[in-house]
Amino acid sequence: MKKLRCLIIEDEPLSQDVLVKYIAGIPELELAGTCGDALSASGLLRNAPIDLIFLDINLPVISGIRFLQTLSHPPMVIFTTAYPEFAVEGFESNAVDYLLKPFSFERFMKAVNKAFERMSYFKSQTGLPALPEQGTTGFLILRADKKVHKINYSDILYLEATGDYIKVHTAPKTLIVHETFRKMEEQLPSELFIRVHRSFIVPVGRISYIEGNRLNIMGTMIPIGLAFREELMKVFKKP
């Protein structure tokens, strides 16, 4: 099983120590860093792949919930706080779970298991292959910002058509490319990417779930066009 890279954002040293100890007790977790406030975590999130954040709600300068709302493509989040009144707002932020301090190792494990379940939902429900790992030969060469960019397939979250341009949303950044959507679609391998709307192409391995006429990719809800729904549902193998 692939390890989940975790980030702790917590201003209380004792709570930090508890989380560090608990993370060390689960071999499938890898601690990428510990930050005392949300602002200092921003740089780390921009420059390192993070799968899961243990995020305190009561933080200096900006709260954990407000900080999460500033992230365009946030990782999975497990909120930690001593104040139960924030639970509803926490879950409305699409959090994996909400840990009320002080919490036991068993309760921590339960929250982490939910994160693993969310991570593996697509594979377990559809049987589709995961996206290639970082560093494989699958990539796009794109011209944007007067530069030539190499974008790995595994970094792409989704592609969005906006007039004569395409926004290529990736884990670290968004590129705006002057290209037709049809030509871009032809460049992408059909076994990894699918067009779900006249303005959206998504990697099949990034889809978390389908809800009504929308699908979820790492917290972002993307519309499903009527003309593309049938083909999308063929990809999803019903139990």
Image (cartoon, rainbow, N blue to C red):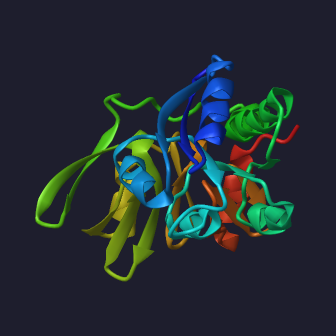
Frontmost residue, 191 versus 204? 204
Work out whether 207 lies above or below 134.
Answer: below
Frontmost residue, 110 versus 80? 80
Q: Image check: 17 left or right of 188?
A: right
Place residue 168 in its image quadrant: bottom left
Work out whether 10 lies above or below 224.
Answer: above
Q: Image check: 18 left or right of 40?
A: right
The furthest residue to the left: 146
Any part of residue 158 in sight: yes
Q: Residue at x 34, y 50 (%)?
A: 187
Q: How many marks?
A: 0
Q: Position of residue 155 (x, y in %)?
A: 41, 45
Q: Position of residue 173 (x, y in %)?
A: 35, 58
Any part of residue 126 in sight: no
From the image, which quarter does the C terminus lie in? top right
Frontmost residue, 20 versus 179? 20
Q: Position of residue 157 (x, y in %)?
A: 48, 53
Q: Residue at x 60, y 54 (%)?
A: 218
